[in-house]
Amino acid sequence: MKEEIIKEIEGLLKAMGVTSSLIEVKPNPRGVVFAIETPDSARLIGNNGEALDAMTHLLRRIVEKKF
């Protein structure tokens, strides 16, 4: 399932025009965290974190629907 979620993240990043050098899975007491390394961090985060919040929301909805 982690690999499928990474593919979804890659698709969202591509749609945003963000290149990623690494997507890493990190265990967390509440589940897993996907860490994204990118030279386009400003584009990924957006103004006041709005783009990152939107991507997180979309990814959660996709995961809820598919998995």
Image (tube, rainbow, N blue to C red):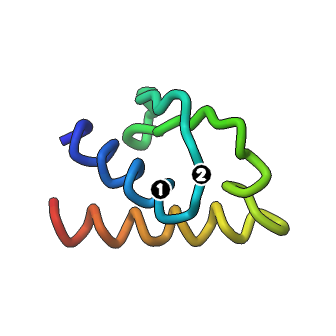
Q: Looking at the figure, which quarter contains the N terminus?
A: top left
Residue type at mark 1 is Lys
Q: Residue at x 43, y 71 (%)?
A: 58
Q: Looking at the figure, which quarter contains the C terminus?
A: bottom left
Q: Residue at x 38, y 65 (%)?
A: 60
Q: Residue at x 64, y 36 (%)?
A: 38
Q: On the image, numbered disc 2 is attached to which residue?
A: 18
Q: Quadrant of residue 47?
A: bottom right
Compared across the picture, whether 7 is left or right of 28 comes to left
- Measured as percent of width and height from the top left, residue 36 is found at 56, 37
Q: Residue at x 40, y 38 (%)?
A: 32
Report if the CB atoms under discs 1 and 2 are less than 8 Å apart: yes
- Measured as percent of width and height from the top left, residue 53 is found at 62, 66
Residue 11 vs residue 28, the one in the foreground: 11
- Measured as percent of width and height from the top left, residue 24 is found at 46, 28
State the mark number for residue 14: 1
Q: Residues within 10 Å of mark 1 (few under 14, many from 20)?
A: few
Residue 56 vs residue 8, the one in the foreground: 8
